[in-house]
Amino acid sequence: MKFNYKKLSLFLLLPLLTSCGSTNKIKYDKEDYRLTMEFKDETFAIEQITDLHYGCYSNIEEMNNFVKNKLIDKDADLLILTGDSFLSATKNIVDNLISLLDEIGIPYAFTYGNHDLQGNYPYYYINEKLMESKVAKFIDYKDDDLDGLANYYIDLVDNDKTYYRLYIIDSNSYYFSNFTYKYDVIHDDQLEFIKEVSKDNVKGLAFFHIPLVEYVDAYNGYKEGKYEGFGDNFEASCIGYKNNGAFDIFKEANILGTFVGHDHLNYSSIDYNGMILSYGVKSSKEIYNDDEILGYKKITLNKNEEGFSLSNIENVFLSYE
Ligand SMILES: [Fe+2]
């Protein structure tokens, strides 16, 4: 990652060190994390938006105009924001984006990146706002026993049949050791949750922020011609600090594709041993970006298609001006 996050002052990390959940944690039923949307037509279009990085340094009006008038495909059935929507933001900036998305009116799912809690608001503020929204597809429990602030799934259903399941997962933020930090992973309890939810073997896709360690091998193999894919990576993958078996658990869970953000110059999609490992397309100019790689990922689900393949995914590039 070209941008040197280590130069960010410690105060940015403080909210992470000081935030904590309730001590009396409740185990909710897996059904309590289930949302549904109708899969009425033959296709269902998802727009993945990532790394907007709205912050106190941003020209909010200019960003809002871009999001409203260019970024959002009005034909999308669902928007999914895969993290780092905020960095050094305030309550007003959080309220601004949520109001903007509400005004646009397309249902949207939201998960966290490593930066979303580095702002001037309580750790549960974004979740509270999302759950007040009538447009957001979001559910969480402040007192639950799952790590992270988003662990839920959206079943796309028609006549009681679930055609696809979208797992919206918080891949957490940092792992501290020896006075330095690395990026975190999806924790074991969250993986257990996915195992539990996936017992009915519904075809799934997973959306989170920090790439799995397999993204490195997938890209190397793709460049060697070993794996099919499209797009490219122009920076090293900043993966989680360890391999805790998430990829194998996802495969077992019938998850056919994973969609992440985090590395702003990467936008590849690779078929890696039967699972598509895909980066989103950076959706704003904030922090660092390449103007040629600005836009979103479009994922089109076909109701009666057997599997899920690269042909379901498309990069959409936009010009900012
Ligand atoms: Fe990130």
Image (cartoon, rainbow, N blue to C red):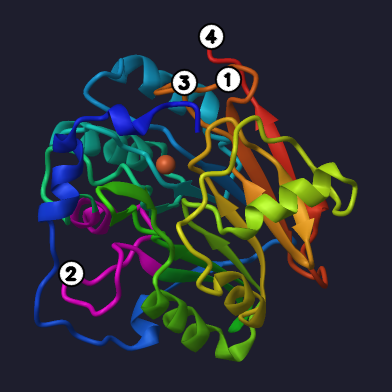
Give the mark toward the camera: 2 or 4.
2
Give the answer, above or below, for where 9 lies relative to 115.
Answer: above
Quarter of the rendered structure image containing ligand 1? top left
Judged by its main secondary structure, the magenta piece is: loop
Q: Mark 4 or 3 closer to N-term?
A: 3
Query: Total label count?
Result: 4
Q: Which residue is mark 3?
A: 285
Query: Which residue sits furthest right?
Result: 225
Find residue 180 and report its horizontal and vertical position in percent: 30, 46
Give the answer, above or below, for where 146 lies relative to 318.
Answer: below
Of helix, strand and loop, which one carries label 4?
loop
Camera-side residue of 223 and 176: 176
Give the mark toward the camera: 1 or 3.
1
Q: Mark 1 or 3 closer to N-term?
A: 3
Q: Which residue is mark 1?
A: 290
Q: Which residue is mark 4?
A: 321
Amino acid type shown at disc 1: Asp
Find residue 208 and report its horizontal and vertical position in percent: 48, 56
For this view, does 195 lie left or right of residue 102? right
Q: Mark 2 or 4 closer to N-term?
A: 2
Q: Is residue 159 visible?
A: no
Amino acid type shown at disc 2: Lys
Alpha carbons under labels 3 and 2: distance apart:
33 Å
Amino acid type shown at disc 3: Lys
Q: Are marks 1 and 3 in contact (CB under 8 Å)?
A: no
Q: Residue at x 10, y 73 (%)?
A: 22
Q: Mark 4 or 1 closer to N-term?
A: 1
Camera-side residue of 104 and 203: 203
Range drawn in magenta: 127-151
Q: Residue at x 41, y 19 (%)?
A: 65
For this view, does 140 lie left or right of residue 83? left
